[in-house]
Image: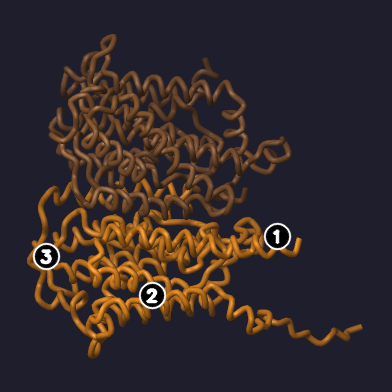
Chain colours: A brown, B orange
Amino acid sequence: MKSFLKYREIWLLAGIVVLIGLISTRFPGFADPANLRQVFNDTSILMILALGQMVVILTRSIDLSMASNLCFTGMVVAMLNAAHPAIPIPVLIVIALAVGLVLGAINGFLVWRLNVPSIVVTLGTLTIYRGATFVVSGGAWVNADQMSPDFINFQRAAFLGLPVLSWIAIIVIALFFLVMTRTAIGRSIYAIGVNPTASVYAGIDVGRTKFIVFCISGMIGGLAGYLWISRYVIASVEVANGYELNIIAACVIGGISIAGGIGSVGGAVLGALFLGIISNALPVINISPFWQMAISGSAIILAVVLNARGERRQGRIILRKAEAA
Amino acid sequence: MTDTPAPRHIPDRLDKPLSSAIFSWEALLVVIAVAIFAVNSFASPYFLDPWSLSDLTFNFTEKGLIALAMALLIISGEIDLSVAAIVALASTMMGMAVQAGAGTPVLVAIGIAVGLACGAFNGLLVTRLGLPSIVVTIGTMSLFRGIAFIILGDQAYKGYPESFAFFGQGYAWWVFSFELALFLVAALIYWFVLHRTSFGRRVFAIGNNPVACQFSGVRVDRIKFILFCLTGLMSGIASVLITSRLGSTRPSIAQGYELEAITMVVLGGVSILGGAGSILGVVLAAFIMGLVTFGLGLLNVPGIVMSIFIGLLLIIVIALPIVWRRLREGRFA
């Protein structure tokens, strides 16, 4: 029992249950399975983005360009769909994954081959990818009436009682869980975060692993690009502006240490769910949505304070050491 | 027995050969700035006019003021992502004060005090609780701007007094705006503090090895706390300027400034890993960013496309010396 309580995820889960309980006292329908399914579906995109960010943060790096990648890939896919409505959706998803992969690989290459700190690389590509969105679209929007019905409805189709979007999230979560706990690359990612120097002696190619990690986050960004655009049915340069910090916030609340090496798939998912529940609940319990930002900010600070107690094994200074490898 | 050796003169710093000055980061930045300047003056006939050059400075003075303090913070190995949110919160508080009938001196005092208080809050969280600053300030970024959203919602504060407009719109002398004058004075002060005082030395030392600093008797936490306060203070000052320039406050004011300020700092040659950098570099980087955005603006390039150039500039300028070193090492290895 005691070892069970050691897991951060259990505490986070308990916090979420308490949160849902509190909301239910104001709005009894919130804890309904139907409503909770809706919350899960609404949070799906943030969850998969948080997972993509998680693998990057685990290696003591950071990817600030995910939201811009999402914006660019979403625009490319939407324009393709507007111009050639006949392209089937699975092909478009593969294209989204590929475009995202290329953008992620650019980040990864700069980090791996040129040894530029990831925060600098992705700060640069954050503005470049969003600017590129403007260049490919000429500043125009792609509206709902330009998208094919398939494009919009694919992720909304119900399958075994859940929308396809939720299933995609579940598949991504399962894949990440398998990779992080059952494969060598998952082990390497944790090892690099815990001790990059020891990882080198253990035969792990730190640079190459970081490259792979950025490719993963890029692909996730691309996938989320299609999902985001088809969900909110508008593609513009402003899509997901500033969302990169929400993604990192979900990771932080989920107990993923910015110093690398600590964090789990369950944590990232729960962290995203926590933010999703707050944003879903505020309107129904009659709190102005303008409170959302301050509440998630407080949640982040609280989460860092709580997580720090578990991590204080040694003094780590993130920015200095984060890139030392 | 008492014959102690005469105290030897230990040089404070090594003599720098001329070549190191020529190949320094700052020299590279000067070359880039001159190049952009030249291209701009050929590309647009409106560029080489004192007044349009003066307008150019408004592109970077507010962010530049924040970048000065941010440079010290990053050199010490920390970072503050909440600066733009501090600007928003300080501006909102000034707006509230205007509604209550406050005059210009009170407004300025409130803007600066709110900035300082926010910086102190960040500093306390980082130094007292030992939390990583990148995460703490992502949190306080949401918190500070969130408070501005709670107070303002989708409203805006207007009706700032006439005299308040001077800070963002007034001119100190001829074409030199008050903002530019303030930026240059602040740059001088920061240059002096960072490069000519023991405090500045300690900032570098902390960035290079905080543990060794601690054991050498440097009060690491206290200095970091001061640096967070300074960053907050500069954000408060920037908030006064931007609020005065725009004449209104919305909760979305100064959105994205944190990344631009950090870009300036990194472009200025400050190591994001801490321990290295110079104020001259940051000032040059601020000018370069102003030149790029203004020059492209004169050519009717949209702001979002300019950001591509800024992003490319950032990556190329950081990557170039690394590639150069690799090439040379490759040749001599």
To which residue does mark 1 refer? B330
Instruction: Point out residue B38 in the picture as x, y percentages from the top left corner.
Output: 37, 80
| Mark 3 belongs to chain | B
- Amino acid, disc 3: Val
Res. B257 in view: yes
- Amino acid, disc 1: Gly
- Amino acid, disc 2: Ile
Q: Residue at x 15, y 29 (%)?
A: A285
B283 or B146: nearer the viewer? B283
Q: Residue at x 78, y 84 (%)?
A: B8
Res. A252 in view: no
Dot 3 or dot 2: first in sequence order is 2
Instruction: Answer few, some or many: residues within 10 Å of disc 3's Cα (few below 14, many 20 plus, some between 14 and 19).
Output: some
CA gap between label 3 and label 2 equals 42 Å
| Mark 2 belongs to chain | B
Report the disc number at residue B36.
2
Secondary structure under tag 1 reads: helix
Q: Residue at x 63, y 84 (%)?
A: B18
CA gap between label 1 and label 3 equals 63 Å
Which of label 1 and label 3 is nearer to you? Answer: 1
Dot 1 or dot 2: first in sequence order is 2
Instruction: Point out residue B259 in the picture as x, y percentages from the top left corner.
Output: 37, 57
